Image: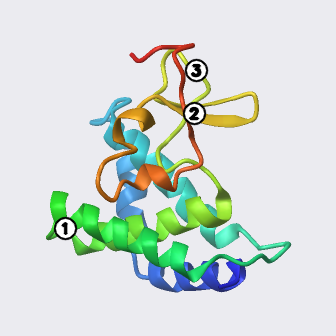
Amino acid sequence: MKASELIGIIRENLKDYPIDYLKRKATDDRYPDSITKRLAIYNSVIYDEIYENEIEEDFEIRDSLIKNLEDDVNYYFSVYDPGDIETRDFTRNLSLYLVFIAKKPLHPFGDNPNKDQVYYLNGEYFCKDKIKYLKDENSLCRYCVSKKAGLTFGFF
């Protein structure tokens, strides 16, 4: 499948998602610097980016990789939150975009290796938890662009 086709499918799948709810959560003071707030901010920004991004140089994405990622997101939600179809579908579409088009981490990232679990340093993304979760069944870490953070910064 071409990247331009995939982003069109993602846009169509997300068009009815209640993004205003997520954007309100991103500015809600009840979540001061929590993972909930950071995810809401990151996902809101990525949602907007999906609709603003135009594929300049189209490229091919193997259908089998797309299907594998979709299946693994479905598996994750079947185990951890089987009733939340809306969040599963939202997560699946954002993950497809982040992995195959934007080539950004699946989790919010910062720029401080001492503070952030996922961080950007010298042109690359790193994740301190990837080494722990990479071998989990159907792990989404296998798709994430973040590299395993080495012992240089340790695990905090």
Image vertical order of residue 90 relative to residue 147, above or below: below
Q: Is residue 47 above or below residue 120?
A: below
In the picture, measured across the screen, residue 27 lies left or right of residue 83, that is right
Q: Kindly give the residue lying farthest to the right in the view shown.
A: 57
| Quarter of the image where one finds residue 22 | bottom left
Q: Given the image, on which type of amino acid does mark 3 rest? A: Asn
Which amino acid, by three-letter code, is at mark 1?
Answer: Ser
- Label 2 residue SS: strand
Q: Which disc, if any, is residue 126?
A: 2
**Residue 121, x across and y down, in percent:** 68, 27
Crowd tier of the residue under label 1, counting other residues whose Cα lies within 10 Å: few below 14, some 14–19, many 20 or above:
some
Residue 117: % across, % down: 45, 28
Q: Position of residue 140 (x, y in %)?
A: 41, 55
Whether residue 48 is visible to the viewer of this picture, yes or no, is: no
In-front residue for pair 22/124? 124
Confirm whether residue 29 shows in the render.
yes
Would you identify the image quadrant in which residue 82 lies? bottom left
Q: Which mark is residue 78?
A: 1
Residue at 62% x, 26% y is: 111
The residue shown at (37%, 41%) is 37
Q: Residues within 10 Å of mark 3 (few under 14, many from 20)?
A: few
Instruction: Judge left or right: residue 75 versus residue 44.
Output: left
Q: In terms of secondary structure, where does tag 3 sit?
A: loop
The N terminus lies in which quarter of the figure? bottom right
Q: Is residue 131 left or right of residue 10?
A: left
Question: Mark 1 against mark 3, which lies toward the viewer?
Answer: 1
Q: Are marks 2 and 3 in contact (CB under 8 Å)?
A: no
Which residue lies under the disc numbered 3? 112
CB under 8 Å between discs 1 and 2: no
Quadrant of image for the C terminus: top left
Location of residue 41 in the rendering, given as x and y in whole percent from the top left corner: 47, 47
